[in-house]
Amino acid sequence: MGALDEGHCNVELENEVKLGSLELGFGGEPETLAIEESVKVLLQGLGEDIHREGLRKTPLRVAKAFREGTKGYKQKVRDIVQGALFLEAGLDNAVGHSGGTGGLVIVRDLDLFSYCESCLLPFHIKCHVGYVPSRQRVVGLSKLSRVADVFAKRLQEPQRLAEEICSALHHGIKPAGVAVVLRCLHIQFPVMEPLFLDSNHQGWVKTFVYAGSGVFDKKNADAWGDFFSLLKFGGISVDNFHGKDSMEHCWCPSRASSCAKASSELGPREAGMVAAVASILKSLGEDPQRKELLGTPDRFVRWLMNFQSMNLEMKLNGVICSQRDIKHYGEISHNKEQIHSELNLSFLSQCEHHLLPFYGVVHIGYFCAEGFNPVAKSLLQSVVDFYGFKLQVQERLTRQIAETISSLLGGDVMVVVEANHTCMISRGIEKLGSSTATIAVLGRFSTDPTARSMFLQCIPNTATSGDS
């Protein structure tokens, strides 16, 4: 395959940037420009240089992501449903329900994303929606998904989202009843100090909620039995769904006691960042004084401060200095060495292009001399955390981990990073289930295919997933 010359490549890149700016139709609009300025304040508050290569277009990218993720505020259900209602006869001269007079219709496994109104982080939604037609009218099935997406593309919390989808469909279609069941997943908030020496930080908050109208108005209605049976036929567990009575407390982990306690620690620099987030909310058409949003700017800033550009070398060096028995295995003869692997070291990081989290696992392989103990897992996890808790890109994260481990162990190191990127699945192309793998090979791993193959075969086949 031929290579493009540098001039042609630059033209292609410039064209891509121009097209990308126009892709969502938000570039240059006053709301977008206001969000860009606020994002610059946030980046500077993190100690970053907003003019460095990886961050120059971050304000625009973040602004477009926020506006795309909240475009539901400007969409109307009536515009979606009108023109998509069709006459469909029911049973003719028979007792029962079918077609346009009482035949239950369900659409399962709709994948949606919404921004959490408590912390402004996106959360994943698996949506199951159904309705019972009446008056010989049915609606185009794709409209169920589109209506659900209208309300997902707003600042939300699970129970209200389920109720808004249910109410909108009931008023738009006028069926005998509507049922909505949601399973929602929210990434955990890190607690920085314990995280630095603990690999068990990865986790998800999961909740199931439901809403119903008409024949589904009561939880014990017979219609729910049919609805749940059809979900089970699709391999969907419905044992843990909850109604609004079980959602009295906020599900967002940013409101956990450990995170709430940290809110009082924000200083003068962070006050400007909090004001910038409040400005973003206004630009999105929201009221920062709305009861549910009063603490949101504060909580979002606390999330970002986990990834501030600061000198954590003392923490990392403190852990390394405690590992006095580390040997430079590269000096040992090859026939007395074996490949040692440390797999599934979890990490959490923040994409510097979109200010959205990405997460996954790191696998590290290195040559270990017979008779010597492998490097402590806590040391390797600390190196992973050290580079993870920054504004990052996965390629750089992989290289930095490999270079640091190589300097400790004598040069022969291989690192594989598997990650799920929120920016890939909650905005733009919305490629749910996609994951990204990157590799760095140093020393003998770069020249020995057999060594690389042996290490790669040790890595589990299971993909990193927030659904687990």
Image: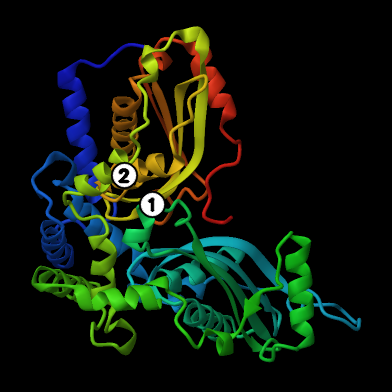
Say few, some or many: other residues with alpha carbon within 10 Å of mark 1 (under 14 / 14 to 19 / 20 or more).
some
Q: Is residue 235 visible?
A: yes
Find the distance from the CA under tag 2 to the CA under tag 1. 9 Å
Q: Picture coordinates of residue 312 (x, y %)?
A: 21, 49
Up the image or down, 362 lies above or below 152; here it is above
The x and y percentages for residue 80 are 47, 71
Mark 2 sits on what residue?
319
The residue that appears at 47% across and 9% down in the rendered structure is: 334
Amino acid at the residue labelled 2: Val
* Horizontal side of residue 303 vs 122, given as left or right: left
Q: Mark 2 or mark 1, which has the lower sequence index? A: 1
Residue 183 in the image: state x and y as whole percent. Answer: 58, 68
Q: Nearer the viewer, mark 2 or mark 1?
A: 2
Q: In this figure, which residue is indicated by the disc labeled 1? A: 197
Kind of element beneath mark 1: loop
Under mark 1, the amino acid is: Leu
Please tell me whether residue 308 is drawn above or below residue 132 in the rendered image: above
Q: Quadrant of the N terminus?
A: top left
Vertical arrangement, residue 364 with respect to residue 61, above or below: above
Towards the viewer: 243 or 179: 243
Q: Going 37% across and 31% down the picture, which residue do you hit?
A: 325
Front-most of 3 and 90?
3
Residue at 66% x, 90% y is 217
Whether residue 103 sits left or right of residue 55 in the image: it is right
Q: Are marks 2 and 1 in contact (CB under 8 Å)?
A: yes
Return the residue found at the far right.
94
* Closer-to-camera residue (14/265): 265
- The quarter of the displayed image where residue 175 is located: bottom right
Q: 25 or 9, which lies in front?
A: 9
**Callout 2: helix, strand or loop?**
helix
